[in-house]
Image (cartoon, rainbow, N blue to C red):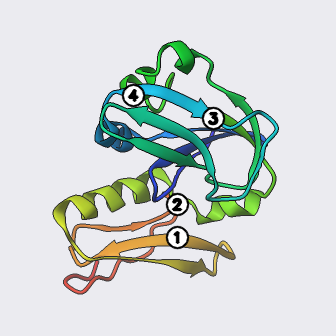
Amino acid sequence: MMVFYTPSHEWVRLDGDVATVGITRHAAEELGEPVFVEARDTGTALAQGEAAAVVESVKAASDIYAPVAGEIAGFNEQLSDSPHLVSEDPEGAGWIFTLKITDRTQLDGLLDATAYKASLLNKSVGQAVTSAWHHDPVRKEFRFRVATRSPLACVYGRALYRPPCRTAHARH
């Protein structure tokens, strides 16, 4: 199964045309202890980026967005009685909803684990981050690229593709 991430800290695990969606560990730590989790009704059609669920914690309430367009297929019923699962196991038992994907091409705009972790690293150390689509002429497809001014951090969105990295300070 493939897993993708959004800049707004949702993860998406694909199983055919159905995606399981939750929040990342980083988001769960920032949110604090959840006290209530709710998703939109099953069958609700959502556009990419539209609010699909809400997680309320002792700190704040946060909308969870549809990472791709689709239709709500289900809700993690365990969260009704145990909302703490979102913070205890956010990328496992704490998943929030499932989504039947209607536009698979939108997955191309999401980050893989390597690019997501690089974006968190760069935010935490305050480095300038640039990201862009890069055309891979060999594979004849586009890949998302995250680069920083640090010579140690230049990551392409798909782990299989590792072209030379050029930053302002280093050439590899």
Q: Earlier in the sequence, mark 4 or mark 2?
A: 4
Label located before the other in sequence (2 or 1): 1
For marks 4 and 2, give the CA distance: 32 Å
Mark 1 element type: strand
Q: CA distance from mark 2 to mark 1?
A: 7 Å
> What amino acid is found at the position of numbered circle 2 in the picture?
Arg
Q: What residue is shown with label 1?
A: 144
Residue that carries the numbered disc 4 in the rendered image? 34
Q: Amino acid at mark 1?
A: Phe
Task: Examine the rendering and report whether any part of residue 95 can be seen.
Answer: no
Residue 172 in the image: above or below residue 125: below
Please say if the residues under marks 2 and 1 sit with CB atoms less than 8 Å apart: yes
The crowd level at tag 1 (other Cα within 10 Å; few <14, some 14-19, many 20+) is some
The residue that appears at 35% across and 53% down in the rendered structure is 117
Q: Identify the disc placed on residue 158.
A: 2
- Asked if residue 115 is positioned above or below residue 45 in the image, the reply reads below
Element carrying mark 3: strand
User: Which residue corresponds to the image point at 22% horizontal and 82% vertical from the top-left?
Assistant: 170
- Across and down, in percent, residue 69 comes to 73, 55
